Amino acid sequence: MMSRIRIVLWAAIAALLIGVGVFFLTQDRETPTSDMVEFGGPFTLVGSDGELFSSSVLDGRPHAIFFGFTNCPDVCPTTLSTLVRLRDQVGGAEAFDIVFITVDPERDGPEEVGRYADLFSTPIIGLTGSSEQIEQVMRQYGVAAIRDGETAPGNYNVNHTASVFLVDEGGKFVSTISPEEPEEIALQKLERIAL
């Protein structure tokens, strides 16, 4: 009889402990906002005119940010050409800004990013900066870039994140366009942010 009471008592204690554990595991845990990292956000770089460029200039304007480099043989010119074509379909240069940020500040100074942006015959904001400035903005957007295949001093490729980052007119990151994304999906995303 005593053994049966002990079994029932231990079963009740076990059930109580399981219930308390389940209760605590299913509760929402708030993360303090001070510990949260904001994706994207404000930045200051150098424009193609050699002057400081604050992202606050983009306030009130949706924009598509692409990280690349001017010596890129394929992905960068293809992505920017596609963005230009899709922007024309959405409403032209007034629909949203295209921002090109170099991941290769060693070779891409203000003059180089300016010339590169001009190749597309439509307004593109070309930005560069110090290595530290570029690395900071890359961290803000989760962009990776790795120098690869240096065959001679200054002759190398840069493997980098090739997504386009879409930011609404309030300065809030809203979506990405991946390189493999079908154009009709990319167009829909751009239409959602366009003015």
Image (cartoon, grey):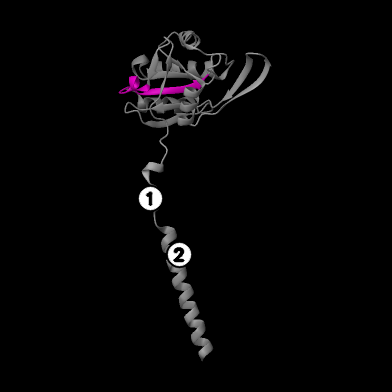
Where is residue 154? Give x, y as percent: 62, 13
The magenta segment: 55-68
Please, which residue is most extreme toward the right here?
151
Residue at image point 45% right, 64% down: 21
- The answer to whether residue 105 shows anywhere in this view is yes
Is 54 or 173 nearer to us in this picture?
A: 54
Q: Is residue 97 magenta?
A: no
How many residues crowd around disc 1 within 10 Å: few (fewer than 14), some, or many (20 or more)? few
- Asked if 17 appears above or below 182 in the picture, the reply is below
Q: CA distance from mark 1 to mark 2?
A: 18 Å
Look at 42% across and 23% down and name the residue there. 64
Image mark for residue 186: none
- Residue 152 as seen in the image, left or right of residue 172: right
Q: Position of residue 8 (x, y in %)?
A: 48, 82
- On residue 30, the disc is 1
Q: What numbered label is drawn on residue 21?
A: 2
Image location of residue 78, percent across then percent down? 53, 17
Q: Does 145 sit above or below residue 16?
A: above
Question: Dot 1: what SS?
Answer: loop
Q: Is residue 82 left or right of residue 31?
A: right
- The residue lying toward the viewer, choosing from 191 and 14, is 14
